[in-house]
Amino acid sequence: MLLACAAVWGVAFICQKRAMAHIGPFLFIALRAWLACAALAPLAWREWKKEGARVNPRRFLRLSLLAGLAFFGGAAFQQAGLVTATVTNAGFLTALYVVITPFLAWAFMRQKPGPQVWAAAVLSFGGTWLLGGGSISALSSGDVLVAVSAVLWALHVVLVGLAAGGGMAAAFTGAQFVVVGTLAGLAAAFLEEAGFDAIWQAGPDILYVGVLSSALTFTLLAVALRATRPSEAAVILSTESLFAAFGAYVLLGERLTTTGWLGAAAIFAATLLVHAPVRATRRSEPAA
């Protein structure tokens, strides 16, 4: 499930980038969120009728609100960043959330990160430096916004992990997108303008991101997190950066410099290092 989510999210970067040629970031987020709500409504209603009686409504609503706020923040920074950032850079910079997730899980869930996480943090910083051509200042404003979004995506993964044990994955995901759609819709109404023709031209990309990259994958994520910890799930989800880079190479003709590829490789290596097994050394016992 997690690998399927990563593949869909990787391709979604391309759709998100293309849509920015027609509509603004907040309108795109609002449309994808409400489309996801519509797709999830039948499943969410069925879940609520079947399992709603055993769910703590206050906890459900609280976590839905917090996860929706984190999602909205992450999506807003990422979508605004994609106006100028390349899909390839956006994919690898977003993957920084894998390194950030264990630290947030430590803060919220008392899951202390291992020593390799600290090394991964240093490696990911070096990778970001190389991705910017050997200078953090060389990163575009869009790159910086995408990097900021990684913190909020990490927070979102932790919050979904906290809610996963309560079940009702479709209802929880739908409730999140109600929050996202409402906030993004208000922001779009005050800050952006777009006609029907612009929305129509961005329609295929909105459809893909709304149904597959939002409704389907975030429901799968909630289900998958019942069986794995957020920090462990994040390392599988980080492969979205590889799918994004491959898609951008084939469909958009994007190319990285040698230095950029070294940085991308360092960031990806950091995401793998986060969960490298740490073997406890045991003193060998003498033979009898």
Image (cartoon, grey):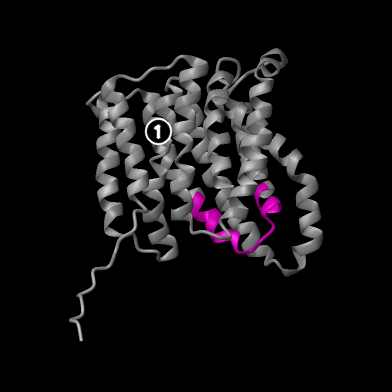
Q: Which residue shows up at 52% across the image and 46% down it? A: 70
> What amino acid is labelled 1 in the image?
Phe
Report if residue 170 lies within the magenta region: yes
Q: Can residue 182 be seen?
A: no
Q: Can residue 168 be seen?
A: yes
Q: Quadrant of the C terminus?
A: bottom left
Q: Which residue shows up at 27% across the image and 52% down it? A: 118
Horizontal side, residue 173 vs residue 258: left or right: right
Q: Which residue shows up at 41% across the image and 31% down it? A: 145
The one of 288 and 125 positioned closer to us in this rendering: 288
Reading the image, the residue beneath label 1 is: 92
**Mark 1: few/some/many CA within 10 Å (<14, 14-19, 20+):** many
Task: Please state the extent of the stretch shown in magenta in the rendering.
Answer: 157-173
Residue 12 at x, y percent in the picture:
56, 29
Q: Is residue 262 above or below residue 1?
A: above
Residue 157 at x, y percent in the picture:
50, 50
Q: Which residue shows up at 32% across the image and 26% down it? A: 261
